[in-house]
Amino acid sequence: MDSTPSLDRFGFPLSEEQRLVREAAREFARERLEPGAAARDRERRFPRELVAELAAQGLLAMKVPVDWGGSGTDNTGYALAMQAIAESCASIAVILASSNLAASILAEHGSDAQRERWLRPYAAGELGPAAFCLTEPHAGSDAAALRTTATRDGDRYRLSGQKMWITSGAHAGLYLVFARTAPAAHDGRPAISCFVLERDTPGLEIGKDEPKMGLRSSGTVALHLDDCAIPADQRVGAEGAGYGIALGALGAGRIGIAAQSLGIAEAALRAGIEYARERVAFGQPITRFQNSRFVIADSRLELDAAWLLTLRAARLLDQGERAAMETSMAKLAASESCGRVVDRVLQLHGGYGYSEEYVIERLYRDARITRIYEGTSEIQRLVIARELLGR
């Protein structure tokens, strides 16, 4: 029995296109991604062989307009597809989250020449995944504190600095890099600009894969930029506009991680129900024990609430709203609920939950990062409070 709820139960009217996006992603994920997820995780192997298939499914550039080779999906469709992918393989979901974030920025802020040069071949799967490069060793949630610099030198920029926790960094064909181009402006906002770097850019050094606790097959590295000289026409948007570009993309990014959290948690609940139906203790199935029933009921309750918040936030973005508070609520609720659900289900498995032979062990590890990246839970609470208090 599939524990994932019918979308109709949430009361959100969905278009036929949104439903088809979700079903196509779900079918593809269960047939092509789920069977090898455990092996890829165990071997810490990046799914290079699947990138072309992801592109063929339109998953690398979901929100890129069709005119530029993308799927033209809205935020609601994107969230539904991301949830479906994460339910089968959370590592591939985060590869897609990072790639789609970079692609969406290039589609929205890039010039026609930049879109033709990079976006179209990327969407076709010719460049591999894309990397979103904002975080630095000393600047995670505080993006304004980044130190990577881009110094104008005639018709070129020279970039120097370090980026950290870059998803797909060792496999990407293009990198969207944010760097400081001048001292802070008078309004206190940092003068940061956005640039496209190609994989073979001289001075771009790719670090070793981080030995992570979870999402092991997504590939995460540090990037070192040692006086990388690039043409000025590789700047995306106006000089100094990068901070606004990055912040403007955060809402949709948080929706993506909320959807990933829902996918992980739905997979955990499915595994918990299946295990509880089969496990016998004290002469009866453990589904007859009150505690087992409470675990399942509480998990379904929390996930339905997180689904509603995520769909609401996605819908508001599709309507053109800024929705800073609502996207933060969705990300906070979904990631925190995910953590509680996987913990409950692991406990339901008893000692077996601690074994790599059971999927809940991997889901437990994968779930932990969702409360950290795309803004920690603490940052989400600050955003919500700021929107309520007006400062």
Image (cartoon, rainbow, N blue to C red):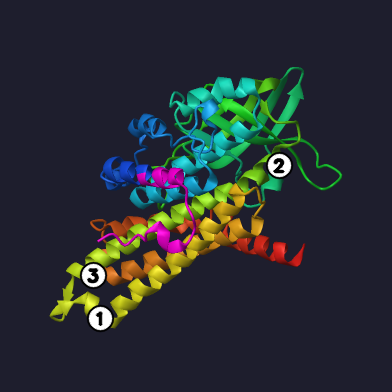
| Mark closer to the chain start, 2 or 3 | 2
Range drawn in magenta: 1-23
Left or right relative to 110: residue 289: left
Q: Which residue is mark 1?
A: 289
Name the mark on residue 139: none
Residue 18 drawn above or below residue 173: below
Label 1 and label 3: CA atoms lie apart by 10 Å
Residue type, label 2: Tyr
| Residue 202 seen in the current view | no
Residue 316: x, y in percent?
60, 53
Residue type, label 3: Ala
Label 2 and label 3: CA atoms lie apart by 49 Å
From this viewpoint, which residue is outermost toward the right?
186
| Residue 191 seen in the current view | yes
Asked if the residues shown at circle 2 and circle 1 are in contact, with their CB atoms under 8 angstroms apart, the answer is no
Element under disc 1: loop
Left or right relative to 194: residue 345: left
- Quick one: 307 or 158, which is closer to the camera? 307
Residue 341 figure quarter: bottom left
